[in-house]
Amino acid sequence: MQDIDPEESIRDWPGRRARHIEQLLEYIETTNKEIEELKADIEDYEGADLSEHERRELAECREDLRQARYVSDYYW
């Protein structure tokens, strides 16, 4: 089985299909950036003496990271 090259697909399928592929690539790139930012945020929180508010924020970051990874894994 051969992987599909999105850049090649954009060239091969003009018009609406190409734009859809471009949108998916942009979404994946944005999601990957979000994952890196969330990982950095989580790292900043971990190991610190956190307030209740900060613990909730850490839990939200972890949940957001889980969801972003799910999306990233789905498309890749």
Image (cartoon, rainbow, N blue to C red):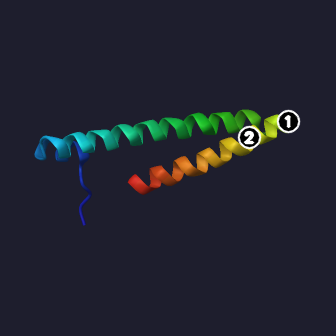
Mark 2 sits on what residue? 58
Amino acid type assigned to the residue bearing label 1 in the image: Leu
Give the label on residue 11, or none: none
Which three-letter amino acid code belongs to the residue tagged 2?
Leu
* Closest to the observer, 29 or 53: 53
Q: Dot 2 surroundings within 10 Å: few (below 14), some, or many (20 or more)?
A: many
Quarter occupied by the N terminus: bottom left
Question: Residue 17: horizontal and vertical position, in percent?
Answer: 19, 46
Q: Quadrant of residue 57?
A: top right
Count up the numbered dots: 2
Give the left or right position of residue 75, taking residue 57 as reference.
Answer: left
Question: Label 2 vs label 1: CA separation?
Answer: 9 Å
Sequence-wise, the earlier of marks 2 and 1 is 1
Q: On the picture, is 14 further left or further right than 50? A: left
Q: At x 25% / y 46%, what residue is drawn? A: 6
Element at label 2: helix
SS class, disc 1: loop
Q: Do labels 2 and 1 touch, CB within 8 Å?
A: yes
Where 41 falls versus 1 (above or below)? above
Horizontal side of residue 51 vs 4, given as left or right: right
Q: Position of residue 22 (x, y in %)?
A: 27, 39
| Coordinates of residue 68 in the picture (x, y in percent) | 53, 47
Q: Judge from the rendering whether residue 59 lies leftward or rightward of residue 35; answer left or right.
A: right
The residue that label 1 is drawn on is: 50
